[in-house]
Amino acid sequence: MKKYEAVIILNPNLSTKVDLFKKDFEGLLKQNSFSINKTEDIGRRQLSYSINNHNKGHYIIFSIEGNPVNLINIENKIKYDDSIIRHLFISVKNHQGEDSQLMIDSKNKKDDPEAEPTVIKDNEKDVLSNNEKNVTEVANSDNESTGELKQKSEENHENE
Amino acid sequence: MNKFEIPKNFDYKNVNILKQFITETGKIIPARVTGISASNQRKLTRNIKIARFLALIPYTDMHK
């Protein structure tokens, strides 16, 4: 018997199906005679770099214990699951009883929920307004350039 | 003298502590600069590399 921590990053678009995935995964663990000490559902989190064109991921950490031989079976099944962006099994000496720092951070964020969504909206607005500005600018510059051309052509005629 | 906060156990989940030990470009700061013990530096390195794999810390500042 060995103790492990399984970190799984789920596709953020499937956040509503997290509970389903959890049940499936726990079933898979039980099939392979693994015992679960603790599960930490950390939730959606910004990734430091994009993985498979995803910028956010749903983190779940399982504290599990079982036979190393069976771990290969679990990993083989997880490999071909499309809803999982990335997974890692780490062997640990002892499971931590307390909440991990990631869990604490995500809880603190949930306490002030207004912080994130407003920022995103503002960004979107900026992008939209920028696009509009660009369009108008392009239109203006088109007019100017054609006007200049006309002037030039007139000048040319005069010269002739 | 030492400006780094050294915990009892380095943990890949404790991102704020690990971030002290990487440069702005994402490199691990060498032990001769951090001044922490060799065994601690090894643990630190191991955990930073795990955190990088899990996208908790960037590998570089060149990510798109």
Image (tube, rainbow, N blue to C red):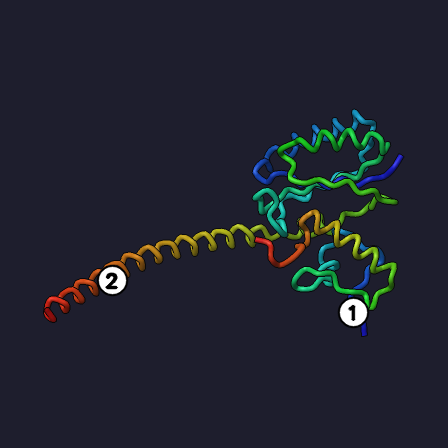
Identified by mark 1, the residue type is Val
Query: In what element is the residue under mark 2?
Result: helix
A155 left or right of A122 in image: left
* B34 lies above or below A57: below
Which residue is disc 2 drawn over? A145
The residue at 38%/54% (across/down) is A131
The x and y percentages for residue A82 are 62, 33
Q: Distance between the residues labelled 1 and 2?
A: 59 Å
* A35 lies above or below A48: above
A160 left or right of A10 in image: left
Which one is in front, B27 or A41?
B27
Are there few (<14), some (14-19), or many (20+) residues within 10 Å of tag 2?
Answer: few
Q: In which quarter of the image is the C terminus of chain A?
A: bottom left
Which residue is disc 1 drawn over? B33
Residue A36 appears in which quarter of the rendering? top right
Query: In what element is the residue under mark 1?
Result: helix
The residue at 64%/39% (across/down) is A85
The residue at 43%/56% (across/down) is A126
The residue at 51%/52% (across/down) is A120
The x and y percentages for residue A138 are 31, 57
Residue A94 appears in which quarter of the rendering? top right
The x and y percentages for residue A35 are 82, 32
